[in-house]
């Protein structure tokens, strides 16, 4: 059995420490480096793959360092704007052998929730997203909500549906919450929550709710480990774990 050497950036954080435990427990993976904010990333501990769960402001710099070292990267940090993604794509052209996966949610159920929402989007005029997280989450709307909205928007475009009319008319100033890709997103921050999302589809006389709940950060680990094992087979930039799981 070949062993993949893995380092973690953001290793002291909630997600990073969970990833360290999961990598340590896997027979085919070896944890070779744990890095956090004040550490010199250097040669990344000789890793084959880095897992990056830090903060939105630092993630792009950390990923760039991994590329310069020729190391594949699995990124869970959210807050990747279109411009940051474009910059990363340009940088990757100089490292065509390196794979980078950026996934806003590594829970398999959340990936399915997004896929189901994308499918349902073709059939409903009206849609809104409610995302619910722990109070220490720094960004809102969540990366998962932004990605779900992007997928729904693309599905609506393909189906020839107009912009979300109900929300536009009842909330012309966006006072009821933010919008991502034209879809209204409501963000709840509450003690006791981990990571939850509902996508509500409505039309006259009926409503469909698609909901996913992560009750514990261990829910993200099967997806993270699957990504670590597959990222080397996918050179270039991939956004969304669904592309590795055959769900896209
Ligand atoms: P956290 O605050 O618990 O951990 C972040 C860690 O990053 C901290 O230990 C911090 O010291 C460290 N850090 C800060 N600056 C750094 C730098 N320059 N270099 C290296 N490390 C640095 O946060 P968290 O709950 O673990 O979440 C981390 C990120 O992952 C957030 O963006 C969050 O939204 C995202 N997240 C993604 C998923 C997913 O499935 N993709 C799931 C949960 C959280």
Image (cartoon, helix red, strand yellow):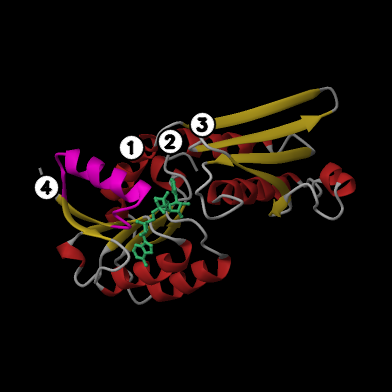
What segment is highlighted magenta in the picture? Answer: 9-30
CB atoms at circles 2 and 1 under 8 Å apart?
A: yes
Looking at the rendered structure, the number of numbered marks drawn on it comes to 4
Residue 2 marker: 4
Does residue 112 belong to the magenta stretch? no
Helix, strand or loop at mark 3:
strand
Q: For the residues marked 2 and 1, what is the alpha-carbon distance in whole angstroms?
A: 8 Å
Q: Residues within 10 Å of mark 3 (few under 14, many from 20)?
A: some
Q: Which sits earlier in the primary sequence, circle 3 or circle 2?
A: 2
Q: Residues within 10 Å of mark 1 (few under 14, many from 20)?
A: some
- The relative height of residue 88 versus residue 1 in the rendered view (above or below) is below
| Left or right relative to 53: residue 24 | left
Q: For the residues marked 1 and 4, what is the alpha-carbon distance in whole angstroms?
A: 19 Å
Where is residue 148, by image quadrant?
Answer: top right
- The relative height of residue 204 versus residue 221 in the rendered view (above or below) is above
Q: For the residues marked 3 and 1, what is the alpha-carbon distance in whole angstroms?
A: 15 Å
Which of discs 4 and 3 lies nearer the camera? The answer is 3
Q: For the residues marked 3 and 2, what is the alpha-carbon distance in whole angstroms?
A: 11 Å
Percent across and percent down for residue 7 are 23, 57
Which of discs 3 and 2 lies nearer the camera? The answer is 3
The residue pinned by badge 3 equals: 213
């Amino acid at each position: 059995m070949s062993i993949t050497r893995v380092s973690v950036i953001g290793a002291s954080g909630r997600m990073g420490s969970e990833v360290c435990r999961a990598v340590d427990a896997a027979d085919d993976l070896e944890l070779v480096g744990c890095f956090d904010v004040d550490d010199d990333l250097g040669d990344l501990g000789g890793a084959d793959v880095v897992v990056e769960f830090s903060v939105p402001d630092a993630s792009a710099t950390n990923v760039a360092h991994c590329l310069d070292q020729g190391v594949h990267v699995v990124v869970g940090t959210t807050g990747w704007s279109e411009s940051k993604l474009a910059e990363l794509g340009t940088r990757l052209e100089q490292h065509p052998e390196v794979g980078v996966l950026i996934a806003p949610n590594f829970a398999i159920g959340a990936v399915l929730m997004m896929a189901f929402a994308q499918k349902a989007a073709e059939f409903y005029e009206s849609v809104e997203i409610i995302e619910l997280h722990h109070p220490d989450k720094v960004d809102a709307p969540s990366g998962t909500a932004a990605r779900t909205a992007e997928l729904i928007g693309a599905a609506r475009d393909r189906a020839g549906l107009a912009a979300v009319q109900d929300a536009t008319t009842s909330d012309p100033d966006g006072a009821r919450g933010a919008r991502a890709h034209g879809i209204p997103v409501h963000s709840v921050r509450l003690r006791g929550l981990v990571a939850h999302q509902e996508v509500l589809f409505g039309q006259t006389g009926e409503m469909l709710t698609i909901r996913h709940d992560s009750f514990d950060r261990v829910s993200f680990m099967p997806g993270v480990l699957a990504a670590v094992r597959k990222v080397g087979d996918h050179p270039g930039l991939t956004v969304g774990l669904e592309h590795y799981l055959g769900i896209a």
